[in-house]
Structures are given as structure tokens and as C-alpha cells.
Image: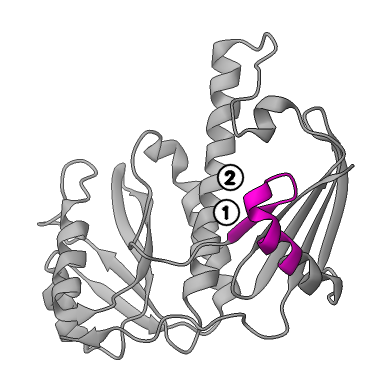
Amino acid sequence: MPLMKLKHGRISAISMTYSHMNHSSKQGGYRPSKGITTGLYHQENYEQRQRIRRQTIQELIENNFDKTTSRFITLTFSNECLPPSIDHRPFKNFIKRIQYRYHYFRYVAIIEITNHENTSRWHYHVICNLPHIDHSELLSLWKCGAVNIQQVYDLEKLKSYFSKQFSQCQPSLKGKKAYFFSRGLVRHQVSRSWIEKEAEQFQKTTHELKCLKPSYLYSGENEYIGHFTYAKYKFPQPKYPVAGFAVRK
């Protein structure tokens, strides 16, 4: 009997059907290396973790923000404030100041590194639920250089931009924190056909997807799960609302 895993969020759902699954994968354990050398396995494992992180960033943005209640912020360092090496304390202090001033502040942030005249500089890109805020106020909250704030007009493009920038800066950030997000953000709900306690949610989601046509469909073969089918669905209407604007305390 085929195995199926479902992930659904605010505006989309994903189904993955497997012909079989080895025991370690089914229980969430590590896949056997099968004689792969440590170096190659380490690189393969790293790349897999990076794919998961990119998916996490896109999932968090999709489920918690939209173009009516979101802002896109860029934070850059002045020459005087730029730390000699990557140091996230200024950014964390910035977040604390906003959280002190605004209730229900939600955000997802990535770091981007640029090289100019043999010098590496980094800045932060942030999508958040701040309401209209004066440039001068945001500048006073950052304290470390320049700020730019814009209304979000295209969430899909912004998701792709965050994912692309996250991928490009990874060689310089290997082993360092490259993205941040606030607590309490909505994640995809996962239900699996072989987990008894997830049966109710699995049946509910399966019933909803029967009425929809996949917006993307792909089939393939994998040594761990055999033949598989990957399908993505778009909901006609969001299943639940995003968090509204943050509110000044």
C-alpha cells in the first residue's frame, strides 16, 4: 500500500506519495551511508540541510505574511559601526527595541554578504508586520547605519529573493547563523498516512485536495522511497488569516 505525506499551510498544500520507505527514514532516523566516505557524505548532508532551510524560509513567509500587512526592510552598517567580523548582536538588539515598542511583532530575516574593494560587508533583509513607520523612527531603532523600508507588493518574488540570497551567501557563512525568525510563526501542518495519531488530519486534508487540481506535478525514482509522486496544490482562498499589523505599546 502506498505511503503518503501531506503538508498544508495557509495558501498551498503538498502531497508526497511513496511506493515504499526504509525503516530508518520512516521513523525519522538517519539514512545509512552505504560506504560513502565521510567527506562526501558530510557535503551531501550539508546540501540537504540547506534545502530544508530554504524551504523553511519560504514556508514561514508564505504562512505569516501578505502584501497588505507586510513591510520589507533592509538594514546596513555604516563604516563606523561595521563589526570586524560577522556579529549578530546589533541585529538582535534592533529586534528587542522593536518588540519593546510594538505588540505582536513578527519577522523573518536573512543576512546577505557583499564584497567591495576586497572587503566583505553584510546587511540584513527583513520581512515583518510593522505598520506605517517613519524612516527617522526606524533609523533610531537600528542605530548602526542606514535603513530602507518598503511596502511588499509581490510575495512570490520576495520569497524567491530571500531564497536566492540565502543560497548565494552560504559559502561565506558556512557554520554561521544565516536566517532568523520570531517565535510563534505558523508552520505547515504535516500528516502522514502511517501515523495513527495523525489519521484525522490526514483524512481531512486528503478530502480537501480531492477537489483541487495540482498546480505542479512531478514523478521520479529514489533508492530510499522507490517510485514517488510530488504534487503541489493552491487553495482558492487562504485557509486562515495572517497576523495583522504589529501594534504600538
- x, y percent for residue 237: 67, 86
Label 1: state its secondary structure.
helix
Crowding around mark 1 (Cα neighbors within 10 Å: few <14, some 14 to 19, many 20+) is few
**CB under 8 Å between discs 1 and 2:** yes
- Mark 1 highlights which residue? 55
Estimate the spatial distance between the alpha carbons at disc 1 and disc 2, rounded to whole Å. 6 Å
Give the quarter of the image for residue 245. Answer: bottom left
Residue drawn 73% across the image and 44% down it: 194
For the residue pair 27 and 226, the one nearer the viewer reads as 27
Crowding around mark 2 (Cα neighbors within 10 Å: few <14, some 14 to 19, many 20+) is few
Label 2: state its secondary structure.
helix
Q: Is residue 74 left or right of residue 205?
A: left
Residue 191 magenta-drawn? yes
For the residue pair 235 and 139, the one nearer the viewer reads as 235
Residue drawn 55% across the image and 15% down it: 39
Identify the amino acid type marked 2.
Answer: Arg
Residue 49 magenta-drawn? no
Give the quarter of the image for residue 11. Answer: bottom right
Q: Is residue 104 left or right of residue 41?
A: left
* Residue 190: image tag: none
Q: Is residue 46 left or right of residue 213?
A: left
- x, y percent for residue 90: 16, 57
Q: Quadrant of the C terminus?
A: bottom left
Residue drawn 85% across the image and 71% down it: 210
- Mark 2 highlights which residue? 51
Residue drawn 75% across the image and 27% down it: 22
What colouring does the structure picture have?
one colour
Q: Which residues are magenta?
A: 189-204
- x, y percent for residue 46: 53, 31
Q: Is residue 45 above or below residue 179?
A: above
